[in-house]
Image (cartoon, rainbow, N blue to C red):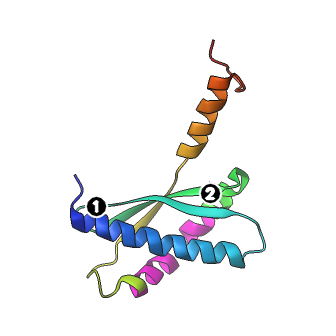
Amino acid sequence: MESNRQRKVAQIIQEDMAEIFRKQASDSKQSFLVSVSDVKVTPDLGIAKIYLSIFPAELRKPIMKEINENNAFYRNYLGQKMAKQVRIIPQLVFYIDTSLDDVERIEKELKGEGDNPIL
């Protein structure tokens, strides 16, 4: 069960990461969207698991590769934003959140539009 402190830190990280991804997407020449769907923080506040939804799907791998390569930049950015609120800036671990894809696939299958319609 998450503590109030974990929830507050996760919310701050989610808002700050959403802000930087929004800024980077608008500055980019490519058209893509990166949204922070969820953030989970360990009880010791040492690790933040950040779940990202990336659209379009074709750009997921290159964008995730770039995000992981720039992990230190994102942690530094969070450090500047959160300096007065936490003693230690958590390590960031990024994951692709495919839950929206799963919902879309299930809806298509229920309507009989999927590759394997349910009989």
Q: Residues within 10 Å of mark 2 (few under 14, many from 20)?
A: many
Identity of the residue furthest to the front in this view: 111
Pick whichever, 33 or 79, lies toward us.
33
Q: Does 99 lie within the magenta span? A: no
Viewed as shown, does residue 22 lie left or right of 76? right
Q: How many marks?
A: 2
Q: Magenta stretch: dominant SS?
A: helix
What's the residue type where badge 1 is placed?
Thr
SS state under label 1: loop
Instruction: Identify the image quadrant of residue 63.
Output: bottom right
- Asked whether residue 44 is in view, the answer is no
Q: Which residue is mark 2?
A: 54
Residue 56 visible? The answer is yes
Q: Name which residue lies at 41% across and 71% down.
A: 13
Q: Which residues are magenta?
A: 65-80
Residue under the image location 54 percent in, 75 percent down: 19
Give how far across and how far down residue 77 sits, in percent: 47, 82
Q: Label 1, label 2: how many angstroms apart (C-alpha)?
A: 24 Å
Q: Name the residue carrying label 1.
A: 42
**For residue 3, side relative to residue 104 (left or right):** left
Residue type at mark 2? Ile
